[in-house]
Image: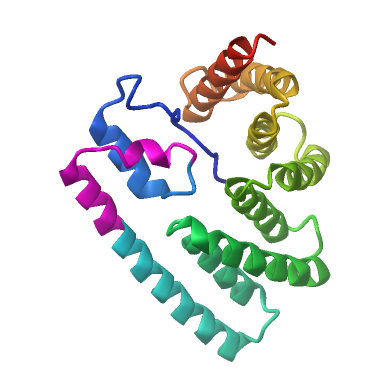
Amino acid sequence: MVLLCRVPEDALDRGWPQEAVVKCAMELGPAEAWWSSAQRLPKNHAIALRTQDMKHAEAERMHRKVLAVRQRELGPEHPVMLAAANNLAIALTRRTESKFAQAETMLHEVLAVQQRVLGYEHPDTLGTVNNLAIVLKPQGKSAEAEKVYRDVLAVFQQVFGPEHPNTLTTVNNLAIALGAQGKSAEAKRMLREVLVAQHRVLGPEYPDTLATIERLAACVRLRYAHGI
């Protein structure tokens, strides 16, 4: 699964190396909340980002070709074909925000078939649900994303247990969706619980643990700024 916002939105203002911001922006694309910071980079870095967008455009074309072949050879409900559609949807989110609606529609269609053919608890289905929530949030649909994450979390807690990395990732993503709606108190509580589990299961220097610390710090700053 993908964790959103591994670096803070104000990375440049806080002294993050420009090269690090460029690398993250090129890998994750404009779906990240801090993409606007990347747009303020010097001209040579901006050129690098535009070059990377061209690569994402080529990746989209390749995914579309693969999907066409899978549909023709395997049919519309084969798991491999559905995985190809899922990959195309994610490729779309690495382009521009205008592609998010298209990606959302595609993921809804894939999810409907997966639920019927594979079942809701199948890993492929849960992966699509997670991707759907990731696509919803940048479109301002945080409330919908929250519901999706809560549904996935209930399944993960039952199937994997409360401290499995997939479960902790989902709680983390849910906290992000809550924070986007101004529910900072609940988001902070969840992040603290995740952080305790990650320290115990993954270790204090694991990337996911550090990402949670960043999110918790941002949540605390937000509450302090609003006097909450």
Count of labels in the image: 0
Q: Position of residue 220 (x, y in %)?
A: 60, 14
Q: Position of residue 206 (x, y in %)?
A: 48, 25
Q: Position of residue 107 (x, y in %)?
A: 65, 64
Residue situated in front as seen by the camera: 137 or 40: 40
- 50 on left or right of 61: left
Identify the residue at horizontal 31%, vertical 63% (top origin).
55
**Split into 4 quadrants, where in the image is the C terminus?**
top right
Judged from this view, the residue extending furthest toward the bottom is 72
- 105 on left or right of 120: left
Residue situated in front as seen by the camera: 101 or 61: 101
Q: Is residue 6 above or below residue 57?
A: above
Judged from this view, the residue extending furthest toward the left is 44
Residue situated in front as seen by the camera: 86 or 8: 8
State which quadrant residue 195 falls in: top right
Is residue 93 among what the camera can see?
Answer: no
Q: How is the image coloured?
A: rainbow
The reply to whether the magenta stretch includes residue 62 is no
Determine the main secondary structure of the stretch shown in magenta: helix
Q: Position of residue 36 (x, y in %)?
A: 40, 40
Q: Is residue 201 above or below residue 22?
A: above
Q: Is residue 61 above or below residue 155?
A: below
- 48 on left or right of 210: left
The reply to whether the magenta stretch includes residue 40 is yes
Identify the residue at horizontal 69%, vertical 22% (top origin).
184
Q: Is residue 182 above or below residue 128?
A: above
Identify the residue at horizontal 65%, vertical 40% (top origin).
166
Is residue 158 among what the camera can see?
Answer: yes
Identify the residue at horizontal 33%, vertical 59% (top origin).
53
Boundaries of the magenta span: 33-52
